[in-house]
Image (cartoon, coloured by chain):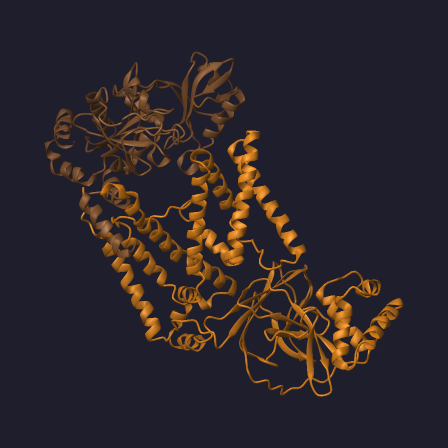
Amino acid sequence: MTIVNIFKQMKLLREKGVLGMNARNAEYVLPNNERHLYPLVDDKVKTKQLAMANNIPVPKMYYVVKSPREIKNDFFNALKPYKDFAIKPAHGQCGEGIIIVTDVINEHYKLIDGTRMTKEDLSYAVSTIMSGVYSLGGQQDEVLVEYRIKFDPVFDEITFRGVPDIRVITYRGVPTMSMLRLPTSYSNGKANLHQDGIGVGVNISTGKSMKAVFRNQIITIHPDTFVDIQGIQIPYWDRILELATRSYDMTGLVYQGVDIVIDKDLGPLILELNARPGLNIQIANQTGIRPRLELIDEHKDEFTSLESRIEFAKKNFR
Amino acid sequence: MKTNSNKHYKLALIIFVPSFLFFLFKVVFLNFPLFPNNDAVSYTIEAKLSFKPKYKTPIKVRMYLPQSKDSFVITDENFLKKGAYGESINQAGDNRTINWTKSEASGEQFFFYRAVVQESSSYSNDKEDKAPSLAINEFIGSQVLAANTLIEHAKSRSADLESFIHEIIKVILDNTYEQELNHLLEGDKSDLKKTELAVSLLNMAQIPARIVHGVELKSDARDVKLEHWFEVFGKNRITSYRMNSSNYKVPYNFLPWYRGKNSLAYISGGTDTHVGIFIRKNIESEISNVVSEAKIQNPTLYKFSLFNLPLDMQRVFQILLLFPLGGIIIVIIRNIIGINSLGTFIPILIAISFRETKLFNGLCLFSIIIAFGLGVMFFLDRLKLLLVPRLTVVLTSVIIFILVMSMLMHNLGFERNVSIALFPMIILTMVIERLSIIWEEQGSTKAIKLCATTLLVAAIIYLIITNSIVTHLMFVFPELALCFLALALSLGRYTGYRLTECFRFGSILE
């Protein structure tokens, strides 16, 4: 690719309204998202407490390990009533450091990928998380134990191990763009696009899945299950939009990523929030996000209520 | 929301304009050179002498000084000392000495000697040294026998003076007469002792010779060791030889400091004597005139120039001033090109440490250390250690690994540049830690890729900051750092696409 081509490419990207990393940071994240609000979303324990106070459904919190000496007794005592749970670093990013236990047999812990952990393995893993391996800047971390999501069967046929989730980007509290993220056999149970997950664009108006992108290429069927990915109606779509919109009122972050999972018993739950959501959602939707953001800026005075914001999104973003 | 504030541009301009004007002023009016001049080579040598005085004891310090002689000219020299000392410079035999005296002193004492030495093409030896009188036989008892064996051996294999000297050097360096040598060297296998032995043997064979101590003039060196060689007085000229099996000739860049058997500095009334020698190739060689003119005309200006600082500080700033440049390169690589590396400034630190090891060695060393560290990390994983102790174990084993490697290299004869002193070990350990997590979480390909891009970025930065013109500019014109600051400010809100994003978002355009 010659230099001329590169400039041509950049011009095309600009015309398509694709938001680059620099522009996202300099024009949307830095001027809008106030620094002091970041801890609300960077710390999963805080996010959860805030959500519960605002009546927003989240996976139930079983226990928080705050200091290493709790690991030996308190932690395992707290786990006793549960047969399955998820263990997460409070400050983790991109799903790093998450351990999902699906069954407990005689103090042996069966993990989602089929491997087993002894009690010692688990307490070592927890203390590793606590020492800050996964947190930004390596500061002391806390460990969260919560309800393990049993995802809705609607995604059974298009998921290969792991949890599919829905990412909605909200700008000024308006759902702007959304995608469904599906794990594949290549992604190790993770649903992130850059870790070989599948990103499926979701029509905000209807909640139906559109084109899908896998390894930067457009696909129509799941590479593991060979099932058509397009045109799937995501259940509880209005509820999902409502949760995404309400989480803006809860945190006050103007440009925010909301990760939602659908539990087969509890319905949509907010998994986590992100103050610097990634740009891959544009690839999944095969369109740039900038025109939508600018449209929202133009109409920002019209958003008087929660309903008006959802209404605006459903009308304009399809 | 688009912020229309252009404050950062204004600030950048406010900083850029005066610093750039100052740069131009220095170039145009003060004639500071834009390019390094390699023709007129001059070196600044600095000897720092320190010792602890004994309680209430008169202090007498004697140190040898180099002199304008042979192919070297001392163009400038000065002395610095702490406290009021009596000072006198004497010519004692072949040598020039400086003496400092004081009735008593307390606290650590320092003396600095700084000289600018220039290589001159004129080989005028106006003051020809007289041949030293042959030293009285220095060997005792059975040593005489051993010495005779060596001399006989050399004589039997030589035809003239020249070849005799070669044979003497050979016989000392070789191990054919191991027993005799051991006896004569008294277990001391240093270069100094061997040179001394050569001189003694020559003297014993009625050939006038004397030992010379000096330094090798090279571009940048701290804690320089004294080199030793010897001069032989032929019929009408003096020839120098070095105890080196491959080449007996003394390199032209060896500056003779003093001659004779004494040590460089002698102190009575003090303990813990230490002499440190620094050498720096002068960038200012060509501008020394300019600077000294500026010194007279504009003393304040000179006061704020880097050349006024002690040499070791100058060396530090020479390196520090490369950081702003490295920072700008990182900004460009990350925000405009879009290549991510481990950590933000880790590539700069790696690049700076490459200065010591040279690029290829550095890259190899770095990869080997990282690979070793990862190995240790994965092994430790089974032991289930907590993070900080685990990191400490990795750090320690990495350092021991380097130690063993250096010793191996040394013994195998790869002396060249295993100087890893500046290698940022702690940062390396963090890199290993970070990498091992990425390895486990995102797979080996990702980790290796990231490691490779980090090394690539470090190599790019290295190639830029070691360019002699760049180093010269940054050191002679420190105000350029402010220009880079302004540049960084103006790039601070760059919102264009990164180059790599053209590929990343390519599928949207299809």
Any part of residue A2 in sight? yes
Whole-percent x, y for residue A274 in the image: 30, 32
Whole-percent x, y for residue B274 in the image: 64, 61
The reply, left or right, for residue B388 in relation to residue B336 is right
Q: Which chain is brown?
A: A
- In the current view of this chain or complex, which residue is farthest to the top? A81
Residue drawn at point x = 43 percent, y = 52 percent: B456
Any part of residue A276 in sight? no
For residue B45, above or below residue B368: below
Whole-percent x, y for residue B231 in the image: 70, 78
Say which of B243 and B139 sits in front.
B243
The reply, left or right, for residue A26 in relation to residue A129 is left
For residue A194, above or below residue B120: above
The answer to which image quadrant residue B158 occupies is bottom right
Residue drawn at point x = 47 percent, y = 15 percent: A104
Residue drawn at point x = 75 percent, y = 70 percent: B170
For residue A242, above or below residue B376: above
The reply, left or right, for residue A61 in relation to residue B385 is left
Whole-percent x, y for residue B113 in the image: 57, 70
Total labels drawn:
0
The reply, left or right, for residue B149 in relation to residue A230 is right
**Quadrant of the snapshot with the N terminus of chain B:** top left
**Quadrant of the snapshot with the C terminus of chain B:** top left
Residue drawn at point x = 25 percent, y = 42 percent: A24
Chain B: give its colour: orange
Say which of B62 and B459 sits in front.
B459
